[in-house]
Image (cartoon, rainbow, N blue to C red):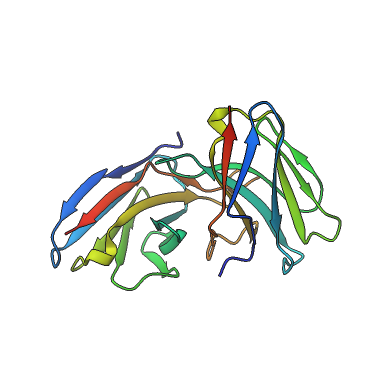
């Protein structure tokens, strides 16, 4: 079973910030939070990851709560091309086995 | 793209026939994975490999076998295809010794239909 819980779907207006939540209340101390997205018919694409500090890259920001039991992926200015399924995953950095994708959040960007 | 190709990209076959899907990488990554994706289930891991000739089962391995005789190729075989194996199959690669993020890179997918 996935170690994360995400809402099945969300809407966001184009140009606004999209905030995607993820609960991971059983995360252990050496597990990272990773986010991927999957645009229709394509393979998933890595977005960002973090351990406990907030992270930002050219695609998104990741906010992790102090107790690390939840996180939020932020797409600062959503465009129609951000319509996709977003997956939140917890895993140890150097453990490449048993990576489990849940069902993710289907994000609809509304024009 | 991370240099991952899958072949074939589309295949229609009949129940009971053997099917082999190929994943080829040019990145020299140590780990390779096969996932299947079905409506309502998201991505589910079938098998993975952590080196040449080293493989292990994922969460939905029944009915599938894999082989990795060289670093760049990971084969997924359905010995006797069933209709329940109709799905989209994704290959992925990763390597914990490369870079800071150790993310997985995914191939374009293979759509398999078993009639």
User: How many marks on residues?
Assistant: 0
Residue extending furthest toward the bottom: B62
Point out residue A51 in the picture as x, y percentages from the top left corner. Answer: 75, 53
Point out residue B80 in the picture as x, y percentages from the top left corner. Answer: 18, 68
Q: Residue at x 31, y 63 (%)?
A: B66
Q: Is B27 or B58 nearer to us in this picture?
A: B58
In-image side of B58 versus A22 (left or right): left
Quadrant occupied by the C terminus of chain A = top right
Q: Is B25 or A90 nearer to us in this picture?
A: A90
Residue B8 visible in the snapshot: no
Q: Is B35 or B95 nearer to us in this picture?
A: B35
Quadrant housing residue A70 = bottom right
Point out residue B8 in the picture as x, y percentages from the top left corner. Answer: 24, 45
In-image side of A89 versus A26 (left or right): left
Position above or below: B110 against A5: above
Point out residue B53 in the picture as x, y percentages from the top left corner. Answer: 36, 64
Residue A27 visible in the snapshot: yes
Position above or below: B60 against A91: below
Quadrant housing residue A17 = top right
Q: Is B83 or A58 nearer to us in this picture?
A: B83
Residue extending furthest toward the right: A66
Position above or below: B84 against A81: below
In-image side of B58 versus A110 (left or right): left
Position above or below: A63 against A101: above
């Amino acid at each position: 079973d996935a170690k994360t819980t995400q809402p099945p779907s969300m809407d966001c207006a184009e140009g606004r910030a999209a905030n995607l939540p993820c609960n991971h209340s059983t995360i252990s101390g050496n597990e990272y939070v990773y986010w991927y997205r999957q645009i229709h018919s394509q393979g998933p694409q890595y977005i960002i990851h973090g351990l406990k500090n907030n992270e930002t890259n050219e695609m998104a920001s990741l906010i992790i709560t102090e107790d690390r039991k939840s996180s939020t992926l932020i797409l600062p200015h959503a465009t129609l091309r951000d319509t996709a399924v977003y997956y939140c995953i917890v895993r140890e950095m150097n453990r490449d086995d048993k990576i489990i994708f849940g069902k993710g959040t289907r994000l609809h960007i509304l024009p | 793209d991370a240099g991952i190709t899958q072949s074939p990209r589309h295949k229609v076959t009949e129940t009971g026939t053997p099917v082999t899907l190929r994943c080829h990488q040019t990145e020299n990554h140590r780990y390779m994975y096969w996932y299947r994706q079905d409506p309502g289930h998201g991505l589910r891991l079938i098998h993975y490999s952590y080196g040449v000739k080293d493989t292990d089962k994922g969460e939905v391995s029944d009915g599938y076998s894999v082989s990795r005789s060289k670093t760049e190729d990971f084969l997924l075989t359905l010995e006797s295809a069933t209709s329940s194996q109709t799905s989209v199959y994704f290959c992925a690669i990763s390597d914990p010794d490369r870079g800071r993020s150790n993310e997985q890179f995914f191939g374009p997918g293979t759509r398999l239909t078993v009639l």
